[in-house]
Image (cartoon, coloured by chain):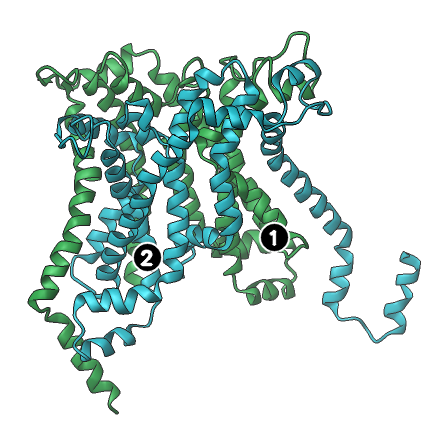
Amino acid sequence: MTAQAAPVPLAAPPAPPARAARRRTRPGRIGVHAFLMAVSLAFLAPLLLAVYASLRPYDETAEHGYFSLPRHLSLDYYRQAFSDSGMTKYFVNTMIIAVPGVLVTLFLASFVAFALARLKMRGGLVLLMLFTAGNLLPQQVIVTPLYVVFNRIPLPYWMSDSMTMFDSYWAVVVVQVGFQLGFCVFVLANFMRTLPQEILEAAVVDGAGVWTRYWRITLPLCRPALAALGTLQFTWMYNDFLWALVFISDGDKLPITSALNNLRGQFFTDYNLLAAGSVIVALPTLVVFLLLQRHFIAGLTLGSSKG
Amino acid sequence: MSFIPARRTGRRVSRRFTGRDLAVLAVLLGIPVLLDIAVVWGPTLASVALSFTGWDGIGDIKWVGTQNYENLFNNYPQFWPAARHNLLWLAFLGLVATPFGLLLAVLIDRGVRFSRFYQSTLYMPVVLSLAVVGFIAQLVFSRDQGALNAVIGDTGSPTDWLGDPDLNIWMVMLAAAWRHTGYVMILYLAGLKAVDPSLKEAAAIDGAGETQTFFRIVLPTLRPVNVIVGVITVIESLRAFDIVYAVNHGRNGLELLSVLVTDNIIGEASRIGFGSAIAVVLLVVSLGFVVTYLVQELRGEKNR
């Protein structure tokens, strides 16, 4: 093949240098593909292993090893995880925390970002720093005082059956919102700066108030950024482990990610059941990722790729 | 012609808010700012204050000066190993996982075929929670039931990857890197797309090789991304908690500062003051980086 390829450039008009260069790097390309493929498979392997293990009875893997061919495949572990461990309940708990958490965070953060980026207020930079820096602190720095304070804030019974902020969904939602505000303000303010200011000025001439300028004019333009951030925030709140672990003591109120840790005692004798539990917990974020990949990645890079 | 006056009016009017505007601003700026102070900055200051007290969370708060810090540095056997582990974590993510993510981004950015597949696969672990990563790590690394020992056929005297206190930190860091690499890769991919291709062409015309072009041209233009990735790497290393907690509650070789804080407040012996002192150590280290980052941002803001 090489012998055949050689005369072609000679006979034909001189090949552009770019083309020649591309031809030269072809073996390099195969190397790149081999490397990327190997890394991709290595990255997928643990997940595939978990899925495979979760479908087989543990006795079988114990006897024949993980990489034996399956003799029985069943969804039994999934049934067991749902019926015996009440996974549904934990999913509901997660939704009780994450859905209001995401909505409130986006609403409050978008207004702050609007005020900072579009109203050009004095002291805006200080405010931006306050929010951004707050999001960068390690969670453990704020955990202790919040734990103490939440234990002392009484709530009526209809809001929390523990009668305090501690051991209630309110505690986790408030912390999620407060902590994530920083990131969302940062990202949305950067995004809003890229919007044309003229539209806003025209609205001001028409006598639009602050609320109209925010709700009717700026927010609709932010839809892509809000979708991206919403996706990202949902997975972050879904994946949260620490807040619920510290602020919720009643095992029945735990969100799914933290609950898995509690269930581990039950799972300990059977790693394939643990695998099923892990897959169940991982599945929603994986599905969200596969369906909304574009949004997801946009959410992460919005904050970093500003000119 | 009409553009200029309109603009001027716009500017003048936007300075003057009506009563309703002010009410909206007060409420909708007030709530998030108060929340940020109540949830983030207030507790941070309170942590600093509490770290100088001896308190079990119930009785009187006693001022003890720097005693907690003295005990922490001199009489708390877990502290130095935990600090070392945090540093090791930072070094591993910073020197291995981050450059690896950059390498993957550069390879994918060259426009190879199937790049979307590679990109999605490599990024997938990022959507998993670190706790789930910890559980999956157990499936892979566990002594009797793990897949790794099965692969290397180590059945006679199986290696206890997660139980051996000299080994387990490496395995857990590997699991953390699994997630970190994809995150870094995505950030760099976005950055690389923004690099002006004519710069690269100019370098090629001047006879620069690919490696030379990368280090002299591309990497410097990636500076903003480098800063963000650096901040994320540092913060993630200081925050590291979920994986080790999921594996063995951060004991027996997996001590981290974050685990020590949690242990001291939600354990049976609630030592609020002492736990706060550990948190303040974390705070001081991270603030060093956060301030550096903010100064950078601030400078960029002024040039805008």
Q: Position of residue B251 (x, y in %)?
A: 41, 15
- Within 10 angstroms of label 1, few (less than 14), some, or many (20 or more) residues? few
- Within 10 angstroms of label 2, few (less than 14), some, or many (20 or more) residues? many
Residue A211, quarter of picture? bottom left
Q: Colour of chain A?
A: cyan
Q: Position of residue B105 (x, y in %)?
A: 57, 49
Question: What residue would you read off at disc 1?
Answer: B116
Question: What residue would you read off at disc 2?
Answer: A188
Left or right of B286 on screen, residue A27: right
Residue B13, quarter of picture? bottom left
Q: Colour of chain B?
A: green
For mark 1, name the chain: B
Left or right of B121 on screen, residue A235: left
Residue A167, quarter of picture? top left
- Image quarter where the C terminus of chain A lies is bottom left
Label 2 – label 1 distance at C-alpha: 27 Å
Tell me if I can see residue A24 in this picture: yes
Q: Position of residue B129 (x, y in %)?
A: 44, 34
Number of the label disc, if any, that sits on residue B193: none
